[in-house]
Image (spheres, grey):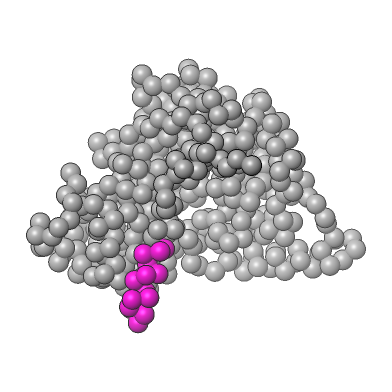
Amino acid sequence: MKLNKNFKNLKENYLFAEVSRRVEKYKADFPSSDVISLGIGDVTLPLSNKAVDACRSAGLDLGTTGGFRGYGPYDGYPFLKNAIVDYYKRRNIEIHTDEVFVTDGAKNGIGNFLDLFDEDNVVMIPDPVYPAYVDANILDGRKIVYCDATRENKFLAMPPKKVKADIIYLCSPNNPTGAAYTVEQLKEWVDYALENKAVILYDAAYEAYIEGKGIARSIFEVVGARDCAVEFCSFSKMAGFTGVRCGWTVIPMNSPLNRMWLHRQAIKFNGTSYVVQRMAESMLRGGYEDTKLMVSAYKNNAKIITKKFDELGIEYTGGKNAPYIWFYCGVDSWEFFDYLLSKARLVCTPGCGFGKNGNGWIRLTSFNSKERTEEAIKRFEKFWKDFEAVKNKLTFSTVK
């Protein structure tokens, strides 16, 4: 028996596990402390009543002879696939039901999709980026090249002219920076992928938060994308399904990846639960207005944060088209994390955990109640004014 040698190339601690470890240690040391988390991006609002009703109804179906279902289709039940097609049609995007594959979430979908690719592919990933993209390819032993997302390009990496890649990761709105690509910017990536005979793995898990004119909600708004792109979406942040687990993947029929993915799913996946798929369908049909209310609540939290940042003169991206606010702290990200936790009892996510370009930056999320967000930003305002006054006297590593 031989272990996967690539495991030794991973960082010792996964970013979010390390955040959790430090928070739990602080709580153990100060058990009466009221800690508010604006860190890990999990949702907090309860499910829509329509989703709960759909769950209950589907469960009752399974308790009857006529409604019982065993293994479902590998690619998802037609009722949900049709609802997803209609969801795109409302945005004037035409896809076919045979191009839709229901999964148990975007993260799993993107990670498992790598089964279709040989390890001898060069992978291009923006920096900073969601760390699971990087780790999944490290485990498979692929070469990774990075393209820089910085304040100079508003944290929207664009195709490097002299670097070739075979697999390209794009996330818009971006996790962690909250920056979102325009259709014109994505056209440059599509042209680059076509020129290099590459595939774009497009993570659109936060597309429901986009409101800006000209900002793309789907890669398939771009001419040529059907010849080079695969899109991954999720119900997690639009309908609060982080614990329910449901998402989908769109693979154009003209791509060999379409049939390959169905084959892969038949080998390794027995389909998403019937009950979960009925819940997901309800969120795209009669419960769609509920998803918009949930998204609006989190976006209002983001406005609470960004309004205060504007008042304090803090440099940031995100917030408008995403549930993430990415701000400049100017010192080592982990040191800032510890200092913020100890002085204000607030949890953030250190930007350096998303890549080298993230050091000196911090990610906050809007996934909390309005009341807790308001309390958090009150604490942050006091903390920031004190921090600005003493920052140069502290032992922090300064990051330019």
Q: Residue 275 location in percent, x, y?
A: 72, 60
Q: Nearer the viewer, residue 240 or 24?
A: 24
Residue at x 71% of width, y 31% of height: 259
Q: Residue furthest front?
A: 1
Looking at the image, residue 114 lies above or below residue 228? below
Looking at the image, residue 190 lies above or below residue 372? above
Residue at x 80% of width, y 52% of height: 71
Is residue 22 a member of the stretch shown in magenta? yes
Is residue 63 a member of the stretch shown in magenta? no
Evaluate whether residue 79 shows in this view: yes
Which stretch is magenta?
20-36
Q: Residue 128 location in percent, x, y?
A: 36, 42
Q: Which quadrant is the N terminus positioned in? A: top right
Tally of marks: 0
Q: Residue furthest right?
A: 65
Name the quadrant containing residue 372: bottom left
Q: Residue 366 location in percent, x, y?
A: 39, 60
Q: Nearer the viewer, residue 23 or 302?
A: 23
Name the quadrant containing residue 4: top right
Evaluate whether residue 90 shows in this view: no
Looking at the image, residue 236 lies above or below residue 378? above
Q: Nearer the viewer, residue 261 or 398?
A: 398
Q: Residue 23 location in percent, x, y?
A: 37, 67
Residue at x 74% of width, y 40% of height: 267
Q: Residue furthest bottom?
A: 32
Q: Which quadrant is the C terminus positioned in? A: top left
In the picture, measured across the screen, residue 391 lies left or right of residue 244, that is left
Residue at x 87% of width, y 66% of height: 64
